[in-house]
Image (cartoon, rainbow, N blue to C red):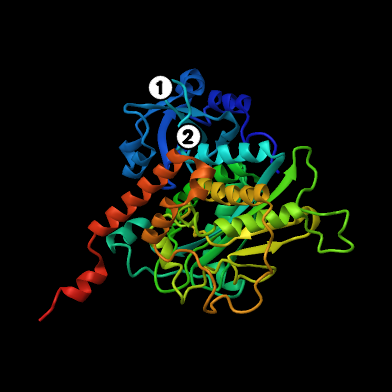
Amino acid sequence: MTDGPALELDEFERLVNSGHVDTVLVVWTDPGGRLQGERVHARHFSEQVLAGGLNVEPGRADPSAVALAAPSGSLVLRPDPATLRPAPWLAGSVMVQGDLFRADGLPVRTAPRQVLAAQVKEAADLGVVPSGAISVQFTVFGSGYAEAAGRNWTGLTEAGGGAGLGSSSIDEDLLRDLRQTAYNAGLTVHSSHGTGVAGQYDLSFQHDDLIRTADDHMAFRSAASELAHRHEKSLTFMARYDDRPGNGARLSMSLRGLDGSLVFSDTANQDFSDGRSAVFRSFVAGVLATLRDFTLLYAPTVNSYKRFRPDGAAPTAITWGEGGTASALRVAGRGETLRVQNRVPGADANPYLAQAAMLAGGLYGIRAGLPLEQPLIGDSRAPGLARVPASLAAARQTFAGSDLARNAFGEDVVAMCLRAADAELDAFDAAVTDWERRRGFDMH
């Protein structure tokens, strides 16, 4: 796990004084999983914004941010100095992430970073500290963003990314830049590899505390788009771009005691058991028990559910397993490395809300002492297995009627998530797609 910020304040001041840094990206993540905020001059940041915050209007940049339902007028974005990091994908820039506060000084509970922070506090109240990692897939195209937009985002050709290691070399210039830039920004990429789907790659990061994991994920997504543009390519974190398998995200999570002790591992009885504690079993059982109710937080867009098609590779059966990718949850590691992976989310998931959902589910299981069912042995596509909702509308309805969601997050957060889903559904219903034009233009 990482200690301290990627960029200390005194080093930041040195870089400003030497002229190497002149711009600070002061950002927050909206309910739609997009970075919002402003670029400010480094001197203005040091002299005013760092201590006083930045006035922002949530709905100005993206209508989905209105889902916060914050009081009218500007909110204050207060930078978190622990998130200050170099932004080497942009000239002379650093990035800092922060939290939204109302004019009366109260935090905006419905802001995604605050939603996750509330669940981390719930864990601390139970005497445990969660950590996690996000592995994410994305698809790279040989066309730049301007050309992709000119083609209306259709008919794009992937550059590489087949089954063998050599096939990913076509995009290695970009991938190498991504790995090194991530490292220079305070992120540690464990590995990258092609998935076997043309143009699709998988990057995994080291475990860290959950809020930092989400912060890092948002910084990486920002860097990835900028670097793809620099390499005259484009990439997407869409859950599914076309008829091939979509882009997924694996959320790994584990718990330790407040003193750093192992919580998931049963070291006293591991010679006579599988080495997994009762806390671990209840945590996994809780995540399973809440998968259906919390799917809206794992799959927040209309496109998320295209990845859930029966012909896709995404696991939708509410089961767990010890190997492979068939089950929604996969248990991996042993002892200090014992963890559970959630494979339901797509690459388009909001990392704060998705991790908050997984942690809330696990904590529910611990409090209730839920027993863990037997792992899935066999085909996850077999009939009769319980599955997550198959559409955004169904997930929204399930979440709206969920007492589990209200008990875990509160009425205000539930209402925010429902408003965000409604905005997504309304926008989709108002759009006329290429499929409709091809099917209905010439009806004679």
Q: Nearer the viewer, residue 223 or 399?
A: 399
Task: Indicate whether 276 appears above or below 413.
Answer: below
Return the residue at label 1. 103
The x, y position of residue 45, in whole percent, is: 48, 24
Callout 1 amino acid: Ala
Residue found 35% across the figure and 46% down from its top:
419
Front residue of this view, candidates 87 and 395 = 395
Residue farthest toward the bottom in the current orientation of the protein = 444
x then y, percent, for residue 50: 51, 23
Image coords of residue 12 (percent x, y): 58, 28
Task: Please say if 33 is above or below 104.
Answer: below
| Quarter in which the C terminus is drawn | bottom left
Tell me the quarter of the image containing the N terminus. top right
Q: CA distance from mark 1 to mark 2?
A: 14 Å
Question: In the rendered view, would you say 240 is above or below 11?
Answer: below
Q: Is residue 144 left or right of residue 258?
A: left
* Residue in view at x 87 percent, y 57 percent: 269
Q: Nearer the viewer, mark 1 or mark 2?
A: 2
Residue type at mark 2 is: Arg
Look at the numbered disc 2 and give the secondary structure of its residue.
Answer: loop
Residue wearing tag 2: 109
